[in-house]
Image (cartoon, helix red, strand yellow):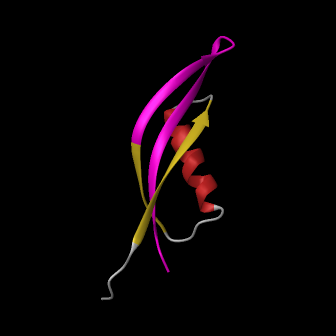
Amino acid sequence: MADSVYKVIELVGTSTKGWEDAAKNAVEKAGESLKNLRIAEIVKLDVTVEDGGFRYRARVALSFKVQ
């Protein structure tokens, strides 16, 4: 088996529905332009209060295989 190299980037996804949806949004958006996504790790979760509602944010470390 050949050795591999992976790059890790950090993204912040947002949602008004919840943290899971925020993380999913970050990974799905990254998948539109990055290939070979491997692992998504939730680094931090927080929420902001905006106009009486909540905006959930998920900081995600995402790795992908370098070709």
Q: Residue at x 60, y 30 (%)?
A: 17
Q: Does the magenta segment cover residue 63?
A: yes
Toward the viewer: 37 or 20? 37
Q: Residue at x 65, y 64 (%)?
A: 33
Q: Residue at x 55, y 52 (%)?
A: 27
Q: Main secondary structure of the magenta part?
A: strand
Count of numbered labels shown in the rendering: 0
**Image quadrant where residue 51 sits:** top right
Magenta span covers which residues? 43-67
In this rendering, position of residue 21 left or right of residue 32: left
Please determine whether, in this image, residue 48 is positioned above or below residue 35.
above
- Most extreme residue toward the top, as rendered? 52
The quadrant the N terminus occupies is bottom left
Please determine whether, in this image, residue 17 is positioned above or below residue 11.
above
In this rendering, position of residue 2 left or right of residue 26: left
Please determine whether, in this image, residue 27 is positioned above or below residue 31.
above
Residue 35 image position (x, y, % from top left): 56, 70
Residue 37 image position (x, y, % from top left): 49, 65
- Most extreme residue toward the bottom, as rendered? 1
Q: Residue at x 47, y 41 (%)?
A: 59
Q: Does the magenta segment cover residue 42?
A: no
Residue 67 image position (x, y, % from top left): 50, 80
